């Protein structure tokens, strides 16, 4: 499903800085990073707790800004973002970024006299109405500081990040092929089924996708009704060779499900 990578200018500059080595060492493990030669500052960022789940989605984000010699750096305004990540649909194996990113700014705290900054009670979740197909269960928290505030001069930028686990409940999907399991070009394939989510979670609105060809992530899509029921139909093409169902619940803390369909396209050339 099309999704734009990191739309903000800040994220683009951060990626450039990481690629060129202009940023200080990222603190992915939330431990203090050593200053690289020429660095003036070092950033760290961490969360408490380090993980979230369906019933517990809040963390406190904390971090530090120090000078290269380790002394606290007060009055530094740091931009903090949550970045929800999605796996890129890439069946061809091309050397492209395997991840899509959806960032949102959490705030711009200022370091105190000890060089510390805090954003309390942050909700780790997907915000917005976009699809959660292929969402990853690790959410990244990033911290960024640019000395002169000019993102066109990335040499004076500093970056740190950490990952918050987001444990999701499992779901399932069942199906029935209405007409036939051996099809040919021109036939209309009809599949109906039901998505089952954890007890107490409303299945209405869960996205259901039907794939028919290996290059395309899906051919048809629909949303489940209030009882989880859905129907999908497509006209078979002579090259359709991969039939599968995938689901994407509306809640990031409920994982999607997938099922391969036992459909044979007799119009495919025999090997």
Image: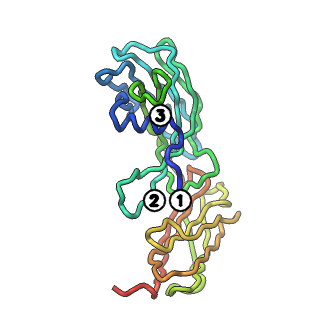
Disc 3/disc 1 C-alpha distance (Å): 25 Å
Identify whether 255 is placed above or below 101. below
Judging by the rendered image, the residue that carries numbered circle 2 is 89
**Looking at the image, which is closer to me, 117 or 80?**
80
Q: What residue is at 51 percent from the left and 81 percent from the top?
A: 237
Q: From the viewer's perspective, is the residue at label 3 or at label 1 nearer?
A: 1
Q: Residues within 10 Å of mark 1 (few under 14, many from 20)?
A: few
Q: How many marks?
A: 3
Between the C-alphas of marks 3 and 2, the distance is 24 Å
- Label drawn at residue 1: 1
Q: Secondary structure at mark 1?
A: loop
Q: Secondary structure at mark 3?
A: strand
Q: Residue at x 47, y 78 (%)?
A: 240
Helix, strand or loop for disc 2: loop
Above or below, 1 against 12 in this view is below
In the image, taking residue 196 as reference, residue 167 lies left or right, namely left
- Which quarter of the rendering shows the C terminus? bottom left
The mark nearer the N terminus, 1 or 2, is 1
Asked where in the image residue 67 lies, by quadrant, the reply is: top left
Frontmost residue, 228 versus 248: 248
User: Which numbered disc, 3 or 1, marks the residue that appears first in the sequence?
Assistant: 1
Determine which residue is flagged by label 3: 142
In the image, farthest residue toward the left: 37
Q: Residues within 10 Å of mark 2 (few under 14, many from 20)?
A: some
Q: Position of residue 181 (x, y in %)?
A: 51, 84
- Say if mark 1 contacts mark 2, CB within 8 Å: yes
């Amino acid at each position: 499903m099309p999704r734009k990578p990191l739309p903000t200018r800040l994220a683009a500059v951060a990626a450039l800085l990481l690629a060129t080595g202009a940023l200080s060492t990222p603190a992915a493990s939330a431990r203090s990073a050593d200053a690289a030669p020429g660095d003036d500052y070092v950033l760290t960022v961490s969360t408490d707790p380090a993980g979230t789940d369906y019933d517990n989605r809040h963390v406190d984000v904390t971090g530090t800004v120090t000078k290269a010699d380790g002394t606290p750096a007060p009055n530094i305004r740091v931009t903090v973002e949550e970045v929800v990540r999605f796996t890129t649909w890439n069946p061809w194996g091309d050397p492209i970024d395997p991840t899509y990113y959806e960032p949102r700014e959490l705030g711009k705290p200022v370091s105190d006299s000890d060089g510390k900054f805090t954003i309390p009670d942050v909700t780790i979740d997907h915000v917005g109405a976009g699809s959660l197909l292929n969402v990853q269960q690790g959410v990244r928290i990033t911290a960024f500081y640019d000395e002169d505030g000019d993102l066109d001069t990335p040499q004076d930028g500093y970056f740190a990040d950490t990952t918050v686990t987001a444990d999701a409940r499992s779901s399932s999907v069942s199906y029935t092929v209405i007409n036939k399991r051996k099809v040919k070009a021109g036939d209309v394939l009809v599949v109906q089924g039901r998505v089952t989510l954890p007890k107490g979670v409303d299945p209405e609105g869960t996205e259901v996708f039907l794939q028919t060809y290996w290059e395309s992530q899906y051919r048809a899509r629909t949303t489940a009704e209030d009882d989880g029921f859905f129907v999908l139909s497509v006209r078979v093409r002579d090259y359709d060779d991969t039939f599968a169902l995938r689901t994407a619940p509306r809640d990031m803390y409920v994982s999607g499900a997938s099922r391969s369909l036992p459909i044979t396209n007799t119009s495919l050339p025999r090997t």
